[in-house]
Image: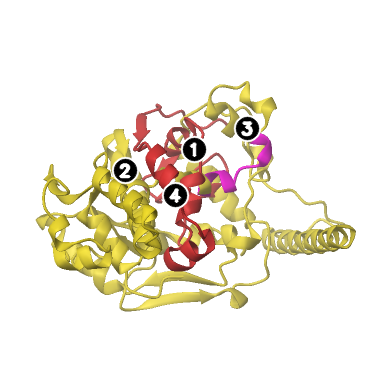
Amino acid sequence: MIPTKRSVKKYSFKSPNLTRLRELGSLVTSPRGFRDRHGKLLEILKIRVEEGILETLVQFYDLAYHCFTFADYQLVPTLE
Amino acid sequence: MPDKEPFNDLELTPKTSIIAATLHLKPSDMIPPNFIIKGDFQGLTANFLYKKASAFAKDKKIVAFESIIALLIYGLVLFPNLDNFVDVNAVKIFLSKNLVLTLLAATYHSIHYRTIKKDGVIVCCAPLLYKWFSSHLPQSIFSKANTGKSHWSQRIMPLTLDDIVWYHAAGDAGVVIDSCGKFQNVPLIGRYGGITYNPTLAMHQFRYPTKEKPNKFSLSGEFYLNNKYYANMRTKFVQAWHTVRKLDGNRLGKKSNFGHPSYTQWVIDRAMSFGLPYTLPRSLSSTIPHASLPLPPCTQEEYQERLVESNRESATWKRKYDEAMLKMEKMSG
């Protein structure tokens, strides 16, 4: 069985320049205290997104079921 | 797990004096060129906030410094809008501290909207979406052997149901929000509109077995944009959060790594009719789970039952094996 092929669309993601914010974030003296007060925000600054991967993921978005439908599995971003 | 009603964008914009007080700024800071209107949005410039943060750090005003850093992360990373600008909406969410629902809403809404439009810039927190997606991918996909393949589609397309990392102990939900109010699923409310998401399709991500194919009522998809035409829908979404139905993890059945075969078949059928954006380098029928049974079952139902049972058993052994390995690791190290 071969599924039909959809066309690939051109998407991009908002990717702000975080150099300055990362520098300032490194000045936090107690990351643990920061996490207690504000949650795991500093960890988010450390994530380096691999180029092109999200643009590929979004091609699989299924408008009918509000999830990503791959060949034989689905992935669903969740609250938990 | 959010217990509060979600941030719904109907709240009034806080007074500048309140914003200033929360962020340890002076009321006199809340004027141009620090606090400005850019495009259709009111907000603080990142430049001003950078300078403030540096000054607070220098003066060892830790609480004030950290508040500014946290707000900058909300405004630039979690809820990005215009470049180098933290809009009032991000400030509102920062003050309300109801983050998870709002983030998820923004992610779904923007992806859905851009997919309808068939192109454009997706405005959501890309690092978190990346973290979520990569957590389900096998490590090998990031290995050196794979970097030779320049396109991500070439790395993702060969993955099968068994390659996906479905479950992380750290993400053990315990209780799962199942549906709200009159909805059979979960209505998410974001700044540009609302969208429903379907926990039914995510059960195996919580390591609970999916029961057969999902029923269509729990999958009815709603989507709206914030404008006068959809005011009723918006009210419906907000009201739904007055009644939140949760599923208790202990009652959802034995934990399992496997989906129900008829669910998998349902997904394959969907992929067949909906299509895929890239060429699939394998045949689809070969991925339906097979089981070797001592005696051939007589009916389809019997077959299904035995298959589920055997899947469960193998999942239990796998878990026991993992636990034993973990114990050994602890003992040796």
- Give x and y (percent) for residue B142: 63, 34
The chain whose colour is red is A
Kind of residue at badge 2: Val
Q: Do labels 3 and 4 touch, CB within 8 Å?
A: no
* Cα–Cα span, label 2 and label 4: 23 Å
Using the image, name the chain to which the residue with label 2 belongs.
B
Query: Do the dots labelled 2 and 3 sit on one chain?
Result: yes
The dot on residue A25 is: 4
Above-or-below relation of B150 to B58: above
Q: Which residue is mark 1?
A: A49
Observer-nearest residue: B195 or B132?
Answer: B132
* Cα–Cα span, label 4 and label 1: 18 Å
Task: Tell us which disc is closer to us: 2 or 1.
Answer: 1
- Give x and y (percent) for residue B199: 47, 62
* Label 1 CA crowd tier, 10 Å (few <14, some 14–19, many 20+): some
Examine the structure image and report whether residue B312 is included in the region drawn in magenta: no
Using the image, name the chain to which the residue with label 4 belongs.
A
Q: Do labels 2 and 3 touch, CB within 8 Å?
A: no
Ranked by sequence position, the earlier of labels 4 and 1 is 4
Above-or-below relation of B147 to B284: above
The chain whose colour is yellow is B
Q: Which residue is mark 2?
A: B123
The dot on residue B158 is: 3
Q: Which residues are magenta?
A: B132-141
**Secondary structure at numbered mark 3:** loop
Above-or-below relation of A51 to B8: above
Q: Do labels 4 and 1 touch, CB within 8 Å?
A: no
* Cα–Cα span, label 2 and label 1: 15 Å
